[in-house]
Image: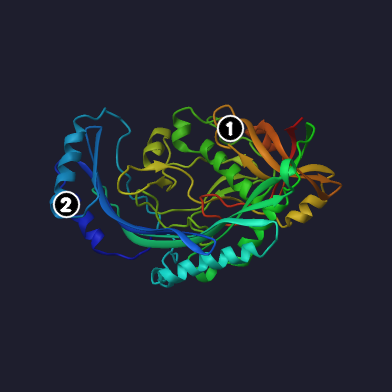
Amino acid sequence: MTSFESELQAIADRVIEQAASGEQVEAFVSRGGETEIRVYEGDVEHFVSAQSEGIGIRVIRDGRTGFAYAGTLDEPAIAEVLAEARDNVEFGTVDEWAGLAEPDGVEPTDQVLWNDELAGFPADRKIDLAKELEKLTAGGDARVRVDDANYADAHAEAAVATTTGIRRSGRENGCYVSVSTLADEGEGEDAETQTGFGFSVGRSPAEFDLERAGREAVERATRLLGATQPASERLTVVLDPFVTAQFLSVISSTLNGEAVVKGRSLFRDRLGEQVAASGVTLVDDPTNPLAYTATDVDGEGLAARRNVLIDDGVLQQFVHNSYSARRAHVSSTGNATRGGFAGTPGVGCLALSLVPGTKSQDELIAGIDRGLLVQQMQGLHSGVNPISGDFSTGAAGLLIDNGAVGAPVREVTIASTLQKMLLDIAEIGGDIDWLPMRSAGMSLVITDVTMSGT
């Protein structure tokens, strides 16, 4: 959100003014919309433009919490939501940590989160972008078919007010394009097809790099043609930036304050300990304007902030919202998450990234005698246990021999533990890639990983 203020703030203010003695009341009001366009062979195959608005109200009294919401901002409906939240308090279980966030004196970082060009961008030009991306990709290699080309954007305006003194409102928007590819080779029983993808993100369509998105989609698919299942061995892996982003999203679940206080994190009792290789610094920084998920406030209205979670390999802190922070006897890190007016705040990283190094992926590979460039991982979240740290997931990529990319491989399993992988990080690439997700990617070198094949 930004410093923009609208009638949504006035609605939230009116709700909390109705708080009774002994009540804590929070009103979260939002409206927004999204556009999704899918193009196939030059035709619009899918076009959805959806709008929504509504309010969610939390009431806390005597350690019990009641919540209710409505997908409308009509005054009679808002009155009903408040009454229902109060009624639901009676069904709540007493929780000594229940309570709303309170102002902590941290001021939001000024950011440009709203783009007028995107807000006024016409639908026909959105379609043209998807068509252009499809055309650029299809012309990249004769072996490649475009499965679909997509344009997507979203905008949101929100306000929050609480009886504890929080009052914030703002708006933000963003967009991205993506393309999926199929690369074919051979005929009959020897025929094979490999998949690829590419994307580009921005605050406005002017920031898109369609040529790069198309080129990456072609390369990801064609590089895996002819892939075979290799023999099992222990080697060094280089994670592609997109795979690194997926890996970091798994790591983020182990640094979640809610998981920690519930005993569901492998790092629960390891603050101040070396948990990653020296030189590894992991930062959650939603104040970085380059991050697709950049924001100035969290889901409870507290200022978003730069939190260093791992510094030079040493675990410094977990991310918390106000509830998990109270349970852990610490302060909120401004990491409340919220999916919208229909839910209560959760906790999680907002814009996670390793501090990048300086080398390109090619330079990293040049220093490896035997390894695997991991281009794809399948079932990553289901293959990782965030409590024990066991890591086992399917993968595909390219073997590395004497500092050069070699034969493509598939149907392999990458196995280790999260604890060991973090300690075995050898180098971090400088090729940082901001993705349409809460984690940034860059090439990542990890030594001594088991690759199971034939």
The residue beneath circle 1 is 384
Residue 433 image point, x, y percent: 61, 57
Residue type highlighted by circle 1: Val
Q: Residue at x 62, y 50 (%)?
A: 242
Q: Position of residue 217 (x, y in %)?
A: 64, 56
Q: Nearer the viewer, residue 135 or 78?
A: 135
Q: Which label belongs to residue 345?
A: none
Quadrant of the snapshot with the N terminus: bottom left
**Which residue lies under the disc numbered 2?**
17
For numbered disc 2, what is the local secondary structure?
Answer: loop
193 vs 70, nearest the viewer:
193
Q: Quadrant of residue 385?
A: top right
Q: Position of residue 276 (x, y in %)?
A: 66, 39
24 in relation to 97, above or below: below
Disc 2 to disc 1, C-alpha distance = 47 Å
Mark 2 surroundings: few (<14), some (14-19) or many (≥20) residues within 10 A: few
Using the rendered view, name the quadrant where residue 430 is placed: bottom right
336 left or right, relative to 436:
left
What's the residue type where badge 2 is placed?
Glu
First of labels 2, 1 by sequence position? 2
Q: Quadrant of residue 49?
A: bottom left
